[in-house]
Amino acid sequence: MRTYYYLSLFIWTYMFHTVDAIPLQEKANSDLPSKMVVDLTKDDGKMLHRTKRGWMWNQFFLLEEYTGTDTQYVGKLHTDQDKGDGNLKYILTGDGAGSLFVIDENTGDIHAAKKLDREEKSLYILRAKAIDRKTGRQVEPESEFIIKIHDINDNEPKFTKDLYTASVPEMSGVGTSVIQVTATDADDANYGNSAKVVYSILQGQPYFSVDPESGIIKTALPDMSRENREQYQVVIQAKDMGGQMGGLSGTTTVNITLTDVNNNPPRFPQSTYQFNSPESVPLGTHLGRIKANDPDVGENAEMEYSIAEGDGADMFDIITDKDTQEGIITVKQNLDFENKMLYTLRVDASNTHPDPRFLHLGPFKDTAVVKISVQDIDEPPVFSKLFYLIEVDEDVKEGSIIGQVTAYDPDAMNNLIKYSIDRHTDMDRIFSIHSENGSIFTLKPLDRESSSWHNISITATEINNSKQSSHIPVFIRILDINDHAPEFAMYYETFVCENAKPGQLIQTISVMDKDDPPRGHKFFFEPVPEFPLNPNFTIVDNKDNTAGIVTRKDGYSRKKMSTYLLPILIFDNDYPIQSSTGTLTIRVCACDNQGNMQSCNAEALVLAAGLSTGALIAILLCVIILLVLVVLFAALKRQRKKEPLIISKDDVRDNIVTYNDEGGGEEDTQAFDIGTLRNPEAREDSKLRRDVMPETIFQIRRTVPLWENIDVQDFIHRRLKENDSDPSAPPYDSLATYAYEGNDSIADSLSSLESLTADCNQDYDYLSDWGPRFKKLADMYGGDDSDRD
């Protein structure tokens, strides 16, 4: 016989700290079932006896938010195998084991190491076991037990919102619901009254009240008027513990607005209004505004004005300004001071949205008297109509009369009228008007497609007083004449497959027409009369302003014909009938079995047999390279044309022109022309440069002639400036040498050519005084006469 012991653990937490151990032991034992012996029959007929072991514990529940200085005692584990010699070790595992709950491994006492919050976690499941310290063998099977956290009132009620906003119609009865506020308490609602919330009103009485259980705010006074007070602020308190003393509480604010209802009729601030109006005011002119006051707002304050009665009901009208709720008095018919000078009207103002609940308060309208005085003035001409609409065909001839306007002088003088067109409205001067009778006629041809409407302004002016004038708009509508032929709506790229079958649709075409016939467009499609029967394609009129192109033969060949031209005759049904011929270009292409185009070029058919795609690309690249080389060669050749023709072998681009011969003397004029230097007063003609081949013949540029006795230095500077601004000059320096000595030298000539013609001999003895450099000259000219001879 073997006895099995199973560890059972019960933990009790309660609100009283001091508990007698013996009653607790008795209570614990009373909760356990009585000891039982379970007989288990084995194969050998022996019986197994199981003895229920008793346990010791002190608590079933644990108090939350413990504030004591010592750790809170939870309970004790004990087994019958524990002899008190310290051989057994108690081990605790599960929720919070080791952190929240610690166990004395020798005695089995369990303590709470930290303060617990039921709102965070209300139930902890732990497991306990006892092992032999020496052998490490578990002497009792692992048992599971529960620690329940007992709630205390440590959470105040909290509203779902810190601020509520609500509204209620004014004039509402007592008890009308406004809004419901809700507060929640995190404490345990199943234990005591910690979570039982009661609502009360702290601010807002006597206008509003609150239901203590549901939190519904209601009106407490009847017939509250928005016009007297519109905004209310109500403070609601939620208190737990059923509202008893010591309970925790929270508050929230509710802003309540009284919404408007139509409970006030409109009222005029005065009974009579006076307005003045000149007799010449145009129709629709605003003479003045009146307004009735309504303390309501929104649509409840909307009102409508009307003329009830009076001798001017047919002469004036009143409209309502929806933005300002004012009544605007306007002129309905032309006024005439000579006929009537004073009108009296009765105007009503009434609400457009009356509330049937408040009709008993009286009629929701008010009446005022409006008097209008007509003032006599010199009036401008008056046209017979407010505007004129003239319709004219676009093919009307130039100079044709298309309409007429008439005006008269309403004054007793009945002055003569002259008419004119405001040219700002007819900048192109298409129309003109007869100044005496107001007949409008055309000056230029009309085209509806360019402009279908012309809006001009006609002025009528009194002949005796040009300041009195009137303007009238004239709308001229150009009526359409069928003067345009229909044409293709777009450019069509049409192709037909080589393997096409007869009757196959290859293209659907549509057309457009600039004209606008009143009955709409209707187009017809036919072959041209020159080719009534095309052997390759058929034109099928779809009767919906489109046509289809259908094949007529079986198969097409790009080798024989790569492109077909199909002329199509298109005409409309308007009068006169307009027609045009559109030519459709149809290419023959290679297609796959589904009819998708692959290639349409005849060259592709020839090259496809021997050249691959890579070869074609290589050929194309070679052609491009050759083109680039040709362009570079042409550019280099063009650059060479600009190089100087006279270049020495030691040329370093300074363009120093050298000559190895003396030339032909003064008779040689092919080199540099130095005649200009010898005679600066000579006429200057621009000459082309001989050292550079001219690329283009520039326009001969006349230079400013040199003035008399000009300085050579100034002349050279002018030449330099001209060369700098010369567009045909090369981009490098040129050296030009000028040997002109200048005019009017104060030194006499030393030439011997003039010595023979001298009247007297000259004395050259002064040359000996000039030093050794002039010794040779002194010897030549300083001797005796016999030596000179």
Image (cartoon, rainbow, N blue to C red):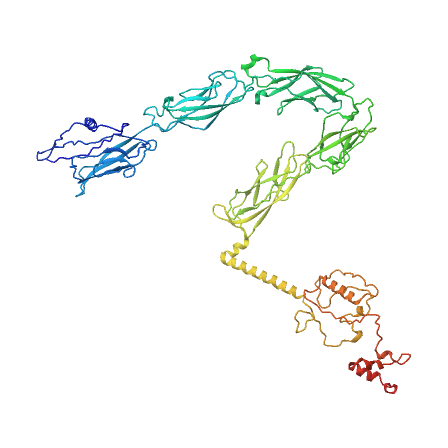
Q: Quadrant of the C terminus?
A: bottom right
Quick one: quadrant of the N terminus? Answer: top left
Viewer can see residue 611: no
In-front residue for pair 466/150: 150
Between 589 and 277, which is closer to the camera in this rendering?
277
Identified at 82% across, 84% down, the residue is 779
Residue 482: x and y in percent read: 68, 36
User: Residue at coordinates 16% horizontally, 39% vertically from top-left?
Assistant: 85
- In the rendered picture of this protein, how many numbered marks are placed on residues? 0
Q: Is residue 605 shown above or below 323?
A: below
Residue sitting farthest toward the right: 759
432 relative to 744, above or below? above
Q: As displayed, is residue 739 above or below residue 168?
A: below
Quarter of the view holding residue 538: top right
Residue 647: % across, % down = 68, 71
Q: Residue at x 62, y 37 (%)?
A: 523
Q: Is residue 9 above or below residue 307?
A: below
**Residue 161: quarter of image:** top left
> In terms of image quadrants, where is residue 99?
top left
In the rendering, at what x and y percent does residue 540 appear?
Answer: 57, 39
Q: Nearer the viewer, residue 757 or 166?
A: 166
Question: Observer-nearest residue: 352 or 447?
Answer: 352
Q: Tell me if residue 41 can be seen.
A: yes
Query: Is residue 319 shown left or right of residue 611?
Result: right
Please state if 144 lies on the left or on the right of 231 as rendered: left
